[in-house]
Image (tube, rainbow, N blue to C red):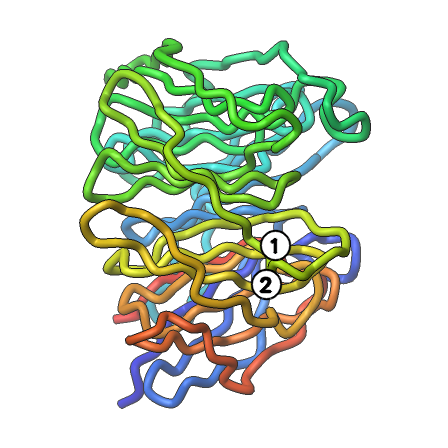
Amino acid sequence: MAKEIFVYIGTYSGGGSRGIYCVKLDADHGTLSEPVLAAEQQDPGFLRISDGILYCTGDPDGEGDKYCTVASYRIGQDDGRLQRISSRQVDKLRFCHISLADNGRVLLGADYRHGKTAAFLLGTEGEIDAVAAVLVYAGASGVNPERQMEPHVHSITPYTKPGYAFVCDFSADAVRCYKTSFEDTSCELSLNDSLFVAAGAGPRHLVCHPGGKLVYVINELSNTIATCVFDGGELELVDEVSTLPADFRGENTAAEIALSPGTRFLYASNRGHDSIAYYSVDAATGALELQGVVSSQGEHPRNFAFTASGKYMVVANRDSNNVVLFKLDKESGEPVYTGTQVQLSQPMGIAFCDTK
């Protein structure tokens, strides 16, 4: 029997989509089924899955400044349908990015529009408690007059080891490191250190090496990846590489960054050049070396994700309305287009869940 993996896709709802869709990936044959609506939800742009529960961002469910900040769903193991567990609406809190911390007991979120981050405690069945902590940002470098004139934060990510979390402070060109304390009834985040990247770089997302000490930051506006060392106290910038070919002269904004399972390779997406850059990761030092840049087979690759085995990558191309399947070369790390893709209006977030 073919190994099937559920692929969940969050979408913008304005172009005809109605929420979160499920596609089945046949891992033996490298094919995708047609998308099926798994749950109605307005603009679920970013997804996370843990222990059979899917968490998503959301946009207004009502009028004014009342937002469906985050929602949780139980995944149906037979058909992939989603059953809503809970949702939280918080005034003027609208997430563009979420992550899970403390072994799935805490949900962290970043609000680009309002320049905030927040934390929620989670129940054992995925219930989302009331907001437990909110941080409000005030700084903006003003280097980019179109994007950095007021506070914006783009992501919040827990460190590989418990006790810390990192925030990409987009408008201040800074990566903030927080000490975290998560109790049964409270969450605390206290500023530990700030690393300032190049002026106008616009840090967007980051990924922590599971081996510890290394943090890779993708800068949206400068189209670079910063390699940082974290010793449990300070973040130190040690290297920076481009996400683009040396001869590219067009407009581009970098988007997603991720390490492959096994951490031999790192990947980044480019919107404008419409491509996926891939790098080898030195096993001893963590240094990145660009191996190549391949077409995303669409426009505006907003997000991508890997199967747990590291065999496949799925890319969401928002502006060309297609979701594309790539097979990762074991030796070079190159994403090789399988010839398989599905059409879906304005796909955004991607998350995988293995079936039984």
Residue 227 in the image: state x and y as whole percent. 39, 39
Q: In this view of the protein, which residue sits in the foreground, 209 or 32?
A: 209
Q: Residue at x 28, y 60 (%)?
A: 264
Q: Position of residue 3 (x, y in %)?
A: 30, 81
Which corner quadrant of the image does residue 37 belong to?
A: bottom right
Residue closer to the observer: 20 or 202 = 202
User: In the picture shown, does residue 175 fall above or below 352?
Assistant: above
Crowd band around label 1 with a 10 angstrom C-alpha radius: few (<14), some (14–19), many (20+): many
Query: Residue 302 got which mark?
Result: 1
Camera-side residue: 188 or 170?
170
Q: CA distance from mark 2 to mark 1?
A: 6 Å
Q: Quadrant of the N terminus?
A: bottom left
Q: Above or below — where is 308 with respect to 112?
A: below
Please provide percent x and percent y for residue 204.
Answer: 55, 37
Asked where in the image residue 183 lies, by quadrant, the reply is: top left
Q: Which mark is residue 316?
A: 2
Rendered residue at 55%/71% (across/down): 294
* Residue at 51% in and 33% down: 155
Type of the residue with mark 1: Arg
Question: Which quadrant is the C terminus positioned in?
Answer: bottom left
Which badge, 2 or 1, is on the more N-terminal residue?
A: 1
